[in-house]
Image (cartoon, grey):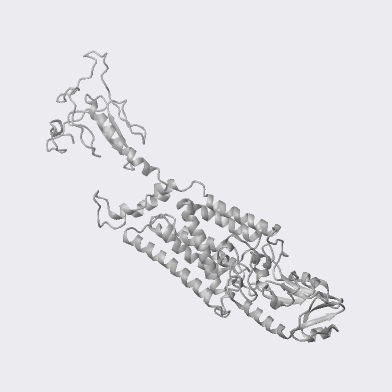
Amino acid sequence: LLSSGLRGGGKSRMSSQPRPPSVPRPQSQGSLPRPALRAQTSLQSPGDTEEQRPQPPPGVPPSNQLLQAPPYHPNYRSSPNGMSGHVEMLPMGETVVVSAAQSSDHALAQHLAAEELNRHRRGTSRHRQSNYSRDHRATSRSRSRTGRGKTGERKEDQEWVNEDEVAEAAPKTPFMTYTFSFVQVLIVLLQILGTPWLPGGLAKWGLGITETRETVRLFDGSEATLTIQNSANPFYGPDVSDIIKWGAKYAPCMRSSIATDTYESIAAGESRAGCCILNGQCGVLNQTDCNSFNGMFQGEGSRCNGSCTLTLRPCCYGATYQCLVQTQSYCNALDGVYHDDDSSTQTCGDVNCLNDICGLGADAEPGKPPRQAERLFLPIFLHAGVIHLIFNILIQISLGKEIEQASSWWRFSIMYIGSGIGGFSFAALFVPDQVSVGASASIYGLLGVDFVHLLHRWKALRDRWSALSCAIFSAFLYLVFGTLPWIDNWAHSGGFFFGLLFGNVFLPFYEWAGWKRHLGFIFSAALIGISFIVLLTLFYENTDPEFCSWCKFINCIEYTPGLCDDEFG
């Protein structure tokens, strides 16, 4: 391939002249170990005599006359004048071994070596790329070939995300995944141990309803035995009423609901009640109950004054809006809140039991909901118990760290929190009066993100069907797990839906390019905003408890009698 035109400074790389036979290389010279890139030359030593110096073959210019170095050509084997240079192409087509031995023109070998060294350095970063990045690069070759930029590159290639830069910018340790998991573990411990502001404790472990008996003192001083039914917790965690106080998704604490209707009916029933006095003790009762205790009824609408001791006070108890005017002993047996704040608090119409049920500093007026919108966010970090937490943490760490390392900490945080809020917005609309907590809404969002990642890399994946089967199995397992109480399958579905959209917007890797990528981004971002607006508008405007009467049966299946009683309110 080296013609006389090269020696004379011409531009031609090929010649029609026959190529002289090449001088064979010495036996000691061979290809260097792959993938090294080296050039070996035999140089003249200043101390050599004329006889010791190697003589060039006939027709080769003296060593002090430098040849014009030819451009690299993969088929180059030897010079037409007997130079023993050769270029060996490796299978990958990236690393080249250059050897020029016993040549009088070592400048040619040095130039070839320098040229190939630069090329090797340019290709080194490609060799360091992970299989994950190579899969994307493989799919990029199959994209549209229309439209080239000024540098000759396709516009789609110019818009392609530099995955090496993204991988280097992504944290080596998925600290947001670990941070979310640590916070969730800490909160479950506090749910069990309790805090000065929020209650703690453990419900009885098991399935269904448990019964306990308590002896209480009544208004006339007699004693009675109460049979109290409570829901067991299959996840080894707190009681449902305590879970609500910690911030579970529960519509009565967020907007007007059936609980406000219950208050209105209770207040209407107390309009005919009056003060009942018995042995120096008093309280507001209806006339029938007062006569049963042999008390003195002061008339409808009357209030007790300071002439007697108020022993009957409003008592709020249970996870739903329930209120009784009873003694403190009776209220304590129900694990309720006994309102003895001041002498004016005498009837259930004087208090708002939702403030006691919801907690979190709720201070709404009687008959008004606390409107705690933060309950769309807080359930992400709450769990029904230790078993629920362990199950979620195992999946969250294994799936979350891969997605966080593939994107970045801030992209992962937005996708995780956004999917969780979207999932619980979904659940608040379809099953508003059911109590639900858990990070599973966000985890299902990560499954949606993983599906997007899988579809974008589908043509480049070698084990595509294995990855798809694993994703489908995980989704099915979570749907089955969601049929237990306090775990919301509607939140799962909503989280998965929003995960698909957030993945299209925030994942840095795309198989689509150009207008397809921009269209997918705009469509997904717009659909996220529209979905939130529609869900929240319907949730706050529609307070009909029969809006979706069958939706609750997707959330909880009664494997044992009474298992879903707290779920259904």
Splitting the image into 4 quarters, where does residue 57 fall?
top left
At 35% from the left edge and 52% from the top edge, which residue is drawn?
Answer: 138
- Of the pair 56 and 7, the residue shown nearer to us: 7
**Residue shown at 56% from the left, 69% from the top:** 489
Q: Position of residue 502 (x, y in %)?
A: 45, 61
Residue at 72% from the left image edge and 62% from the top image edge: 202
Q: Position of residue 163 (x, y in %)?
A: 39, 49
Q: Work out whether 39 lies above or below 477.
A: above
Residue extending farthest front: 306
- Give whichever of 384, 244 is nearer the camera: 244
**Observer able to see residue 473:** no
Left or right: where 269 falls relative to 536: right
For residue 63, side relative to residue 218 (left or right):
left
Which of the 4 quarters of the picture holds residue 390?
bottom right
In the image, 532: left or right of 272?
left
Q: Position of residue 272 (x, y in %)?
A: 73, 86
**In the depicted view, which residue is nearer to us: 179 or 233?**
179
Image-based side of 558 in relation to 64, left or right: right
Q: Is residue 309 above or below residue 38?
A: below
Does residue 546 show up?
A: yes
Which is more toward the observer, 259 or 519?
A: 259
Q: Looking at the rendering, in which quadrant would you find the N terminus?
A: top left
Residue 336 placed where, x, y %? Answer: 73, 70
